[in-house]
Each structure stands twice: as structure tokens, then as C-alpha cells.
Amino acid sequence: MSGCELGLDHVRINGMPDLIKTLAARAPSIGALTRGVSAADQVSRGYGHTLQEICRQPEAWQAIASRLPDCILPRVESSDGLLLVGSGSSHFIGVALAPTLQVSLKRPVRAVSAGEILLSPEAYVNVERCPTIVSFGRSGDSPESIAVADLIFKRWPQCEQVFVTCNPVGRLAKAYESAPKILTIVLGSDVNDQSLVMPSSFTSLWLAGRGLGVRASDSAVPAIASSLAEMGRGLLLEHSDRLAEVAGRSFDHAVFLGSGPRFGAALEAELKMLEMCAGRVTTDAESYLGLRHGPMAGLTNQSLLVAFISTNSRRRAYELDLLKEVQQKELGLCVVYCGSNLPSEIKDSDARLTVEYGVSSLLGDDDLVAIDVLVGQMLGFFRCLHEGLKPDAPSETGVIDRVVPSFPTYSS
């Protein structure tokens, strides 16, 4: 195995400035932030990086997908399957990918946080069981990611590892470039986000993971990325103002619901709201069926529910039943229905909002993760501004940072 750099630093992501300009003309919520305000001034006001990084995602997805086949991502032949490893948002990438990859690879696939492996490595890797370890990390410098990579390499060198990172000079990108059992995939500094909440980094890393096990000759990922890009641009153009309006409502609690792969999107959307609001809005992510088992008690008339609606008819039936129950019990301030080809009977009102993604014969729950996350990013971004905070660095007291600071690790 070897390293592979996609070279996005040299691939002009050229649709983003035009998209921002079009957004400014069509969406007053964006125009107020950008019209007559230079990119440098947007950064100095504390939102420029985040806004640019959210809006560049459709072009970034297409650029990444066009280069992924060059990496010849590995087929997973081992019956021990895959462990998808990361911390925080990077762990949620694995949660979103695991159901999809397990079906497509016909191998066991588990998403495990890097911290959990660090604390109990033998529960996941041992002499009898040696899965391929796939580590996701924007910076490639987080303490857990480095410690897990080093631990696996030293204790179980027979295990193959795949590092997927955005940062060309991070530890994951550089430390094991020549190691025979390690493949390093570097997406490039164009998606190594400056914003604390890593919007384009997350979806770009997720898309790279979506290609795991796909043969170089397979055009599936570029086709998916193209459809996602079209849908993402449509979402930004058609729904930015509506999401800005919802983000400014009088809620102090937000709950994100998702099924299957889209539960990973719910986790990421929940974290974006929490981070960008510096904890002023409390947040939860739940499965639909899980909400009945206790968490429903936390819904008040100041709770916002964001529901990612499945494209699968069986899942959707369970989801809509749950949301009818919430409505009958008069729980929550507002429910935001998000998805593709939403039921026509769901009408907008003060208590309900529909965010229609559009219809695509190619995209299902496995792929709409990226669009769900985009919704969560926009809600978090506008709520952050509503709270008088700066989306690029919302933690005014420095409680959280763009990269987790180093901390001691222990070998025994």
C-alpha cells in the first residue's frame, strides 16, 4: 500500500464564488452577509471561513470524486472486515458509512471512536481478529488518531490501515508514507477547513469513505457526487432563507432524528448546532424509534425537531408514525421535515416546515447523508449569528478549539 494525494490544491473549485453571488441575489439572509462585504471583511467579522466552506461543498464533492479512482481504494477481502475510526465529527463519518459499507462489501463493518480503541484496544483488534483500520481525520493531528495509528502499527503490524485526511502536512499524512501495510489518502488543503466546525472537511471525508471498496473503473462515486452537487446547490438556493428563519425562532433545545446511515448525519448536525451556539442551545440526536424510549420526555414547547426522512418506504412509515405521535401530543415548537420526495400531505405551517431535497433516481439514504449535514450546518450557522457569536470561532472562552490540544497517552 502507499500514499495517494488527490491534489485538490491544484484543482480549482471554481463554482463557489458564483454560487455565493447567486445566493446573495436570491437569499436576503446571505445577501446581508456578503453584498458589499469583501471576503477578507467577512473573515474579520468572524463568519467568512464558515460561509465559504459550507457553500463550496457541491464543487468540492465533484472535484474529489473525479480524483478518487486514482487512489484505487482497497477491496476488503479479510473476513474481519473494517473498523471505521475517528474522533468527534470524524467518528460520525464512520457511523454514517458503516451500514452502507457493510451491505456493499458483505463484510462486518463497525464504527468505533478512536478514544474507545485507545482505552480498550483488545476489544476490537487482537491476534485472532485483524480488521482493516480506516482512520478519518481532518487535521490528521488529533491526539487520539495519532495514538491509535501508532498503537496498531506497533502491536499489530499485520493489520492494514487506511488514513483519510485533509491536511497534507498532518501526522496521518506524513508519518507512515512508506509503510507497506498503510494507505494514506490526502484530500488536500482546499478542504482542510479553517472554521472550527469543519463543514466541507466532514462531507469530503465522508465522500472519500463512500468510495471504499469501489474499483477504480467504477463510475458510481462520481455519478453520486454529481447528483449530490446538484441537490446541494438547489438546497442552498431554495432553502437558505427558510433555514435562517427557523434558526431564529425561540427554541433552546434542538433534536435531530435519523435512521440507518442518516443517524450519522443526525449526530453531526446535532454537534454543529451545539458547537456553533457554544452550548446555548442544548442538543440531542436520536433514532426515531429510540425517541419513544425516554428521550421524548425532554421535548418541550421550546424544542426544535429536525427530521431526516428516509427514502425507504418501510423506514419512512415508522418515521412518519413517530412524528404523528409527536404532533398528537403537541410536543415541540416546530418540526422540520427534510428529505427527497416528501409526502405531499405534509404542509408548511407555524409548527411544520418542509425542506424538499428534490427527486433523484440515484440517491437514497446511503448518499443523502451529505445533504442532511448541509441542512444541519446552515441551521447551526444562522443560529450562531442569531446568538451574536462568530461561526468561525464560536467558543469565546476557548473551551473548544479547531484541533484538540495534545494530552498524555498511556501504553499500560
Image (cartoon, grey):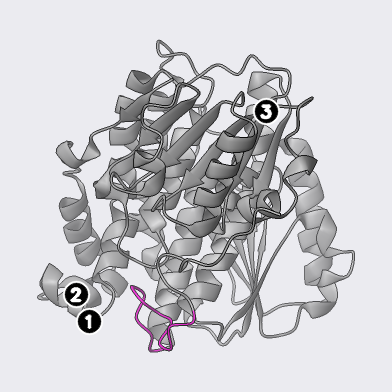
Residue, x 32% and y 20% (percent of image)? 70
Q: Amino acid at mark 2?
A: Gln
Measure the C-alpha gap from mark 3 to mark 1: 46 Å
Q: Would you name the residue on which mark 3 appears?
A: 131
Secondary structure character of the magenta stretch overall: loop
Q: Earlier in the sequence, mark 3 or mark 1?
A: 1
Name the element at disc 2: helix
Residue 117 percent location from the top left of the image: 68, 48
Pointers 2 and 1 in contact (C-beta within 8 Å): yes
Horizontal arrangement in the rendering, residue 49 relative to residue 252 (left or right): left
Q: Is residue 376 left or right of residue 298?
A: left
- The front one of 161 and 349 is 161
Secondary element at tag 3: loop
| Residue denoted by label 2 | 42
- The answer to which of 42 and 316 lies nearer the viewer is 42
The N terminus: image quadrant: top left
Q: Residues within 10 Å of mark 2 (few under 14, many from 20)?
A: some
Q: In front here: 85 or 293?
A: 85
* Direction from residue 76 to residue 3 in the image, left or right: left
Q: Is 395 contained in the magenta span?
A: yes
For the residues labelled 2 and 1, the Cα–Cα distance comes to: 5 Å
State yes or no: discs 3 and 1 in contact (Cβ < 8 Å). no
* Disc nearest the viewer among 3 and 1: 3
Does the magenta run of residues contain 126?
Answer: no
Residue lying farthest to the front in this orientation: 412
The x, y position of residue 206, in whole percent, is 48, 42
Q: Is residue 290 visible?
A: yes
Residue range corresponding to the magenta coloring: 388-399
In the rendering, at what x and y percent does residue 143 appear? 50, 58
- Distance of label 3 from label 2 (alpha carbons): 45 Å
Task: Tell me if 158 is positioned left or right of 7 in this view.
Answer: right
Look at mark 1 in the image and give the residue it sits on: 45
